Amino acid sequence: MSLIDKIRAKAAANIKKIVLPEGDDDRTLRAAEILVNEKLADPVVLGDPAQINEKAKALGVNVNFAVIDPATSPDTARYADLLFELRKAKGLTKEAADKLALDPMYHGILMVKAGDADGLVSGAVHTTGDMLRPALQIIKTKPGMKLVSSSFLMDCPDKSLGEDGLLVYADCVVVPNPNSEELANIAVAAAETARVLCDIKEPRVAMLSFSTKGSADHELVTKVREAVEIAHAIAPELMLDGEMQFDAAIVPEIGASKAKGSPVAGRANVLIFPDLQAGNIGYKITQRIGKASCFAVLQGLAAPCNDLSRGCSVEDIVNTVAMTAVQCLSI
Ligand SMILES: CC(C)(COP(=O)(O)OP(=O)(O)OC[C@H]1O[C@@H](n2cnc3c(N)ncnc32)[C@H](O)[C@@H]1OP(=O)(O)O)[C@@H](O)C(=O)NCCC(=O)NCCS
C-alpha cells in the first residue's frame, strides 16, 4: 500500500470534521463530495449556499456536505468575540474582529480554535501567507512546540532510500532563515511528523549541510552544528546527527566513510535542510528528477491546518484533508 493509501485508510477509520473555507473554488466542491462519498472526512465548506448550490449544479457535484455561510451563521458573533479577546492586546479593535470573522479564512480558523471543527485545509485560492498568518495568530503552536514549520513526505520509487522509500524533508515552506534553535525545533517536529503520518517508528534525523562532521568550516555550518546540540538537549531520545552532506545522510557507504560511527549517516529517513531555499529546492529536485510523490503538511500548530498549492488538483485536496485528519489523532 502506498503512503497516501495508508493515510486515507487511517482517516477513514477516524472521521474528522475538516473546514474547507474556499467554497467559491470548483476543486474544493468536487473534493468535498469525494470526501463524503469515500467516507474519508466530514467536510464543512464555507460560502454562500445559493452560490455553492448553483456552482455545484453546473459542475454536477452533489452537495452532500455541510455548508456554512459566515455572513448568516449564528456562530459568527461568538467567533468575533473570541478573535477580539485573542488579539486585542495586539491592537485588534472589536470592529475589525467583527469584520474578520466574516472572512471565510478567519471564520474557518476560528471554528477550529473554538473546537467546532477538528482541522482546516485551504490554499487552493489563497496564498500560503494568507492561510498561515491567521493560523499562526489564532491557533498558535501546540504545547512544547516553539515554532510552526512544514514537512514534505517524499514517497520515492527507490525503496532502498530512507524508510522503504519514504523520506521526510523539512522545512520546505514556512521558516525562511531559521536560527540554530529554530532549526532544532524543526528537526524535532519533523521527527514527530514522520511518526504520525509515515508510521516511522524510529525516525533517524540528519541535519544537512555542505559539510560532514567538520569537513568544512563556515558560519553556515556552525549554525547546523549548534542546532544538533540544541536538538540533543530538547529531545535526547531522538536519533539525530549532523552536520552532514546529503549523500552522507542517505547512501550507506558514503555515510560509513564520511561519518563513521554515526547512528544516522547512510540511513537517515528525516532530512533537515539548513534554510528554506535549500529545503524548497531540495524537495522539488526529488519530486521532478527523483520522480517522488510528495505530500506537504504543516507541523507544530495546536490544531492541524494545512496549506494547498494554488495549482492543486481535486486529488491533492482530498489527500491533504486525509493527512489533516490523521494529524488530528496526535493532538
Ligand atoms: C509564515 C509567515 C507567513 C509569517 O509571516 P510574517 O509576516 O512574518 O508574520 P508576522 O511576523 O506578522 O507574524 C504573525 C504572527 O505569527 C507568528 N509567527 C510567525 N512565524 C511563525 C512561526 N514559524 N511559528 C510560529 N509563529 C510564527 C508571529 O510571532 C506573530 O505572532 P503574534 O502576532 O501573535 O505576535 C512568513 O514567515 C512567510 O511568509 N514565510 C514563507 C511562506 C512562503 O511564502 N512560502 C512559500 C513556499 S511555497
Image (cartoon, rainbow, N blue to C red):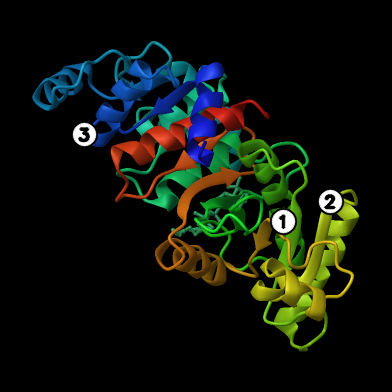
In percent of the image, x 53 and y 45: which residue is there? 297
In the displayed structure, 193 sits above or below 77; it is below
**Total label count?**
3
Q: How far apart are the alpha carbons under marks 1 and 2?
A: 10 Å
> Does residue 16 appear in this view?
no
Taking 217 as reference, is 167 left or right?
left
Disc 1 residue type (three-letter): Ala
| The C terminus lies in quadrant | top right
- Dot 2 alpha-carbon crowd within 10 angstroms: few under 14, some 14 to 19, many 20 or more: some
Q: Residue tagged by mark 3?
A: 26
Q: Residue tagged by mark 2?
A: 238
- Dot 1 alpha-carbon crowd within 10 angstroms: few under 14, some 14 to 19, many 20 or more: many
Disc 3 residue type (three-letter): Asp
Q: Position of residue 307 (x, y in %)?
A: 44, 44
Q: How far apart are the alpha carbons under marks 2 and 3?
A: 43 Å
Q: Are marks 1 and 2 in contact (CB under 8 Å)?
A: yes
**Which mark is in front, 1 or 2?**
2
Q: Looking at the rendering, which quadrant does residue 162 occupy?
A: bottom right
**SS of the residue under disc 2:** loop
Q: Position of residue 315 (x, y in %)?
A: 34, 37
Q: Residue tagged by mark 1?
A: 187
Mark nearer the N terminus (2 vs 3): 3
CB at disc 2 and ligand 1 closer than 8 Å = no
**SS of the residue under disc 1:** helix
In the displayed structure, 220 sits above or below 194; it is below
Disc 2 residue type (three-letter): Leu
In percent of the image, x 89 and y 70: which residue is there? 261
In percent of the image, x 19 and y 21: which residue is there? 61
